[in-house]
Amino acid sequence: MTNRILVTGGCGFVGRHLVSRLLRMGNEVVIVDDLSTGIDPNLWVHPQYEGKFTFYKMDSRDFLRTMAPTRFSDVYHLSAVVGGRLKIDRDPIAVAQDLAIDAEFFNWIIRSKCDRILYASSSAAYPVNLQGKTKHVKLKENMISFEGNMGVPDMTYGWSKLTGEFLATLAAKHYGTHIACVRPFSGYGEDQDKTYPVPAITQRAVNREDPLVIWGSGKQGRDFVHIEDCIDVMLLAIGKISDGSAVNISSGKLTTFLEVASLLATIAEYSPKLQVLTNMPQGVHARFGSVNKTKKILGWTPKISLKEGLKRVFDYANNNTPLMNMLFPEMISH
């Protein structure tokens, strides 16, 4: 029996990879996206899957109010106003629309008869006081507790995701909703928008720019996880978690942006000077997560190393690989 699956925000970076995987698995997918930042699926879904997906170009709130049927086997809620650090830091009220998007979504799911729900949260929900220069720790899921002190998350994006997780626990407890949450750390991949640091630095390396520019001090660190690993966790979590609780999507490793730039320069086979722009946004000093709970509950650890992942990103940017071929590599004719 073919599953009918809804993906809100299905044309963004994470959504494209999730939809592509779901189609390869034989599912029928309904995609909702207003294309404010996403790409029309007719430009990246392989023709073999024509008739296997339906696309609604509209705000997810309008779709849920007016057009959504009451039953899907699975629902992945990715719809959000999100962007790189510049968007989060300098346009915080626009990002606050995520609160309205999620409120509409949770009101819909408690009325619907969907079997399983996945809510895409974020590592931005973690307290920023645990991510500073003088004090930073490996972030564990129990550091967010709705029964105790939660701390202050990262800007309006973090607040919205923290609120979404709270709504997920309420949906599970009071309405019997089967729902899981995931907290991705710094996901990256070949077709990511260049407002994000990895593809931006990669393009500069492809262009062999010297100096090679990095935003912030360059000493700020993140926990980088390749998009295909992120999708693996999402597919596992929706099946194994039902109480609204969350798991990290992380590698457990802290890598600075100076280290990322150095790796990319090595891949590009040149030795540029690394130039930091301290006047540009850089976010918290150190954000990395524990993978222990994810491994225990889902049996998952990352498959793609940072070195391998960055090589994939570099090759994609350098070779101008068509997006469709990257998302559906098995369809390439030889």
Image (cartoon, rainbow, N blue to C red):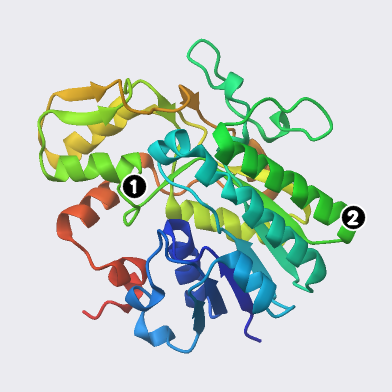
Marker count (numbered): 2
Q: What separation in Å lies between label 2 and label 1 (alpha carbons)?
A: 41 Å
Q: Mark 1 points at which residue?
A: 309
Q: Does the image show residue 291?
A: no
Q: What element carries label 1?
A: helix
Q: Is residue 146 above or below residue 46?
A: above
Left/right placement of residue 57 relative to residue 65 reads left
Q: Quadrant of residue 274?
A: top left
Local crowd size for mark 2, using a 10 Å CA cut-off: few (<14), some (14–19), many (≥20): few
**Mark 2: which amino acid?**
His
**Spot occupied by residue 179 in the image (x, y as percentages of width and height):** 74, 58
Which quadrant holds the C terminus? bottom left
Residue furthest out toward the right:
174
Local crowd size for mark 1, using a 10 Å CA cut-off: few (<14), some (14–19), many (≥20): many
**Spot occupied by residue 267 in the image (x, y as percentages of width and height):** 19, 40
The residue mark sitting in front, 2 or 1, is: 2
Please report the residue visible at 65 percent of the width from the left and 67 percent of the height from the top. 75
Left/right placement of residue 73 relative to residue 227 reads right
Q: In this view, does 328 lie above or below 90?
A: below
Q: Mark 2 points at which residue?
A: 174
Query: Do the residues bearing badges 2 and 1 touch, measured as CB atoms within 8 Å?
Result: no
- Which is nearer the eye, 151 or 17? 151
Q: Does the image show residue 323?
A: yes
Please report the residue visible at 32 percent of the width from the left and 27 percent of the height from the top. 280
Between discs 2 and 1, the one toward the N terminus: 2
Left/right placement of residue 36 relative to residue 64 reads left
**Mark 1: which amino acid?**
Gly
Please report the residue visible at 81 percent of the width from the left and 69 percent of the height from the top. 111
